[in-house]
Amino acid sequence: MVTERTRFYRDKVNGKFLGVSAGLSDYTGIDAIWIRLGFVITTLMMGWPLIIYFALGMMASKKPAHLYADTQEQQKFWQGVRQSPARSAREVKAKFRDIDRRLAHVEEYYVSSNRQLSAEIEKLR
């Protein structure tokens, strides 16, 4: 399900404590070390990020086991969908247009040299 892949989850498998930083890393594409470092620095300066960290740790769902099977390419795709759904849709549409264009070239190649096949394809249209 698409909404399942675009939600924030705690990543207990790759996490160190509650899995919040690893989950944010998976959600945003930012390396977990930078998220952890940011939490530590802002907690030392202000204190309230620690409260938010524990609140996320208690309220966020654990990442479903089947989502761990995603390849790196799939993870990058879904991070892009989370960041900009419209851009992701344009990219997918452009890939389909490219495939359609390439198939048209293949069809043109085979049909141009085979008049009988060309006539049969025209009958189908």
Image: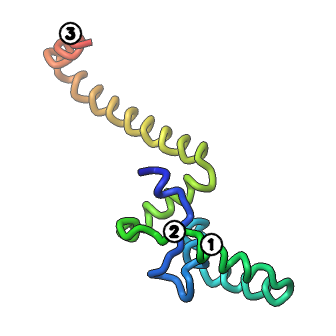
Q: As rendered, which of 27 and 97 lies closer to the eye?
A: 27
Circle nearer the N terminus (3, 1) = 1
**Helix, strand or loop status at disc 3:** helix
For residue 84, above or below residue 118: below
Distance between mark 2 and mark 1 Cα atoms: 20 Å
**Residue 38 visible in the current orientation:** no
- Tell whether label 1 touches label 2 (CB within 8 Å): no
Give the number of the disc on residue 123. 3
Q: Residue beneath label 2, please?
A: 61
Circle nearer the N terminus (2, 1) = 1
Distance between mark 3 and mark 1 Cα atoms: 54 Å
Furthest residue in direction right, as rendered: 45
Query: At label 1, which amino acid type do we have?
Result: Ile
For residue 27, above or below residue 113: below
Tell which tag, 3 or 2, sits nearer the viewer. 2
Q: Residue beneath label 1, please?
A: 30
- The way the protein has been coloured in the rendering is rainbow
Give the number of the disc on residue 110. none
Quarter residue 98 falls in: top left
- Residue 105 in percent (x, y) is at 33, 31
- Residue 6 in percent (x, y) is at 53, 56
Q: Is residue 124 left or right of residue 49?
A: left
**Helix, strand or loop status at disc 2:** loop
Q: Is residue 100 left or right of residue 116?
A: right
